[in-house]
Image (cartoon, helix red, strand yellow):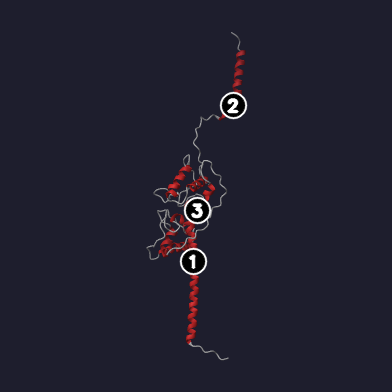
Amino acid sequence: MQMLKTSPRFWLGIIMAASLLAAAHLSARAQSGSDQKLVEGAYIYAQNCAVCHGPNGEGRAGATLAKDWPSIRPDLTVKTIIENGVPGSLMPAWSQVKGGPLSSEQIDSLVYYILSWQTGGAELVTPAPTATRRPPIIPIPEVEGDPNLGALLYDQNCQMCHGPNGEGRVGATLAQDWPGIRPDLSIKATIMDGVPGSLMPAWVQSNGGPLSDSEINDLVAFIISLPNAVTPVESTETSEPQPTWLTGWGGVLLFLLLLIVILMAAWLIQRKPAA
C-alpha cells in the first residue's frame, strides 16, 4: 500500500493542536486545585478565625484581613504571621510546629483564602457547628439560661480563644473557681460589655455584638457549669450555729449524766449523819 504524503504544515498543525489541548487540560486541573484550596481555606477560616477577624475579614477583636497587603510577597507575610503568631498580642501561633492546631497544608489554604479578598473576595463557606460531645448538663436553679443551649453557643463563638472546655488559650481560663457570691452576674457583665483595653469584645446586640440577652444567659449558665467553677449561692441570714453534740444521742447522754449526778448527790446527803 502506498504511504500517504503529508506536508510539514500538516504535522505542524497536529503539534500545535496537541499543545493547546495539553495546556487546556493543565489549566483545568490547576483551576480545580485552586477551587479546592479556596473551599478548604474558607472552612478553616470559618472554624478558627471568623469569630475574631469577622466573617469577611472586616476585623473585630482581631485585625482587618480584607485589605491590600503592603508586601512584594504578601502570601509569605500572612503565612509567617499565622504560623508564628504576633508576640505581645493575643494572636497565637497556629502552626503545629509551634504548638498550634494547623498543618502546613492547612495554613497554605488559609493564606490562599485570605488573600483572595484582594481580588474581589470569595464567598465564605460557613460549616455546620461542630459541638464538643458533652453529657446533658443540669441547670443551676440560681442561674438564668439553659446550659445545654449555652454549650452550642460556646462552641460557635468562644472555644477558639478559651479552649473547648474553658481551659484557656489566647483567652482567659473559664474553668475556674470564680470569686463572689454571684459569679454568674460578673461573667454576664463581662460577656455583654467586653473588657476595655483587651481583645475581649462586647457580645450583646445592644452593644454591637451578635448575641441576644437570652443567648448570653444560656452562655453564662454553661460557663458556670464547667468543672472547677463555683455554683453561686443566694445570700441568706444565718442564725448562730448550734453545737452538734447537743443533738441526737449527744443530748440523751448529757441528760443521763446529769441525772446520775443528781441521784448520787441525793444519796450522799441521805447517808450524811445528823448533827
Tell me the tag on residue 156: 3
Residue 51 versus residue 7 in the image, above or below: above
Q: CA distance from mark 3 to mark 2?
A: 58 Å
Foreground label between 2 and 1: 1
Any part of residue 100 in sight: no
What is the three-letter code of the residue carrying label 3? Gln
Pinpoint residue 49: horizontal percent, then vertical percent.
Answer: 46, 57
In this figure, which residue is indicated by the disc labeled 1?
35
Pinpoint residue 239: horizontal percent, then vertical percent.
Answer: 51, 30
In the image, 274 versus 266, the foreground residue is: 266
Q: CA distance from mark 2 to mark 1?
A: 83 Å
Q: CA distance from mark 3 to mark 1?
A: 26 Å
Helix, strand or loop for disc 1: helix
Name the residue furthest top: 275
Labels 3 and 1: the sequence-earlier one: 1
Pinpoint residue 211: horizontal percent, then vertical percent.
Answer: 47, 50
Binning the other alpha carbons within 10 Å of mark 2 as few (below 14), some (14 to 19) or many (20 upward) gives few
Residue at 48% x, 77% y is 20
Residue 72 versus residue 272 in the image, above or below: below
Name the residue furthest bottom: 2
In the image, 51 versus 122, the foreground residue is: 122
In this figure, which residue is indicated by the disc labeled 2?
251
